[in-house]
């Protein structure tokens, strides 16, 4: 009797978990992607959502005339956006490294100067 109850409760738990995974999907690009678009009408920076446990796809969301639109990451526009964002992140990392090394050099120089006095 106990094993039948445990089996029944396990089945209910499995069904509950399967139902939850379908309803909690928070992918934002469920209604398809924009087709060809002039890049001059894109407003602001695109939002890039990388795959996660919530949504297994890469999603690129752009703003056009105060409306959010999805771009296919495999399309030429999507590849260009991903490439540009990658370059921007590399430039920011190099900038941060340069700033940090300049700060360290300045502090060691000022420390060296004060120690000679």
Image (spheres, rainbow, N blue to C red):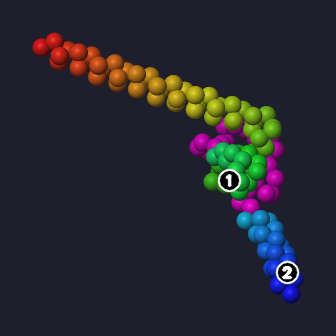
1 and 2 marks in contact (CB < 8 Å): no
Image quarter hosting the N terminus? bottom right
Please provide percent x and percent y for residue 68. Answer: 68, 53
Q: Which residues are magenta?
A: 25-46
Q: Residues within 10 Å of mark 2 (few under 14, many from 20)?
A: few
Q: Main secondary structure of the magenta part?
A: loop
Q: CA distance from mark 1 to mark 2?
A: 52 Å
Looking at the image, residue 32 sits to the left or right of residue 24; the answer is right
The reply to whether residue 64 is visible in this rendering is no
Image quarter hosting the C terminus? top left
Number of marks present in the image shown: 2
Residue toward you, 38 or 12: 12
- Label disc, if present, on residue 68 of the rendered structure: 1
**Residue positioned 58% across, 31% down in the render:** 88
Residue toward you, 26 or 88: 26
Please provide percent x and percent y for residue 28. Answer: 72, 56
Q: Earlier in the sequence, mark 1 or mark 2?
A: 2
- Label disc, if present, on residue 57 of the rendered structure: none
**Residue positioned 20% across, 15% down in the render:** 113
């Amino acid at each position: 009797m106990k094993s039948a109850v445990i089996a029944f409760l396990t089945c209910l738990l499995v069904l509950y978990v399967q139902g939850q995974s379908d309803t909690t999907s928070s992918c934002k690009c469920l209604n398809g992607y924009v087709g060809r678009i002039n890049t001059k009408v894109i407003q602001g920076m695109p939002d890039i959502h990388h795959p996660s446990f919530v949504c297994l796809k890469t999603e690129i969301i752009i703003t056009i005339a105060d409306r959010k639109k999805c771009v296919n990451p495999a399309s030429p526009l999507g590849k260009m956006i991903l490439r540009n964002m990658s370059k921007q992140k590399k430039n920011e990392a190099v900038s941060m490294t340069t700033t940090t090394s300049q700060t360290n050099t300045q502090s060691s120089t000022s420390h060296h100067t004060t120690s000679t006095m």
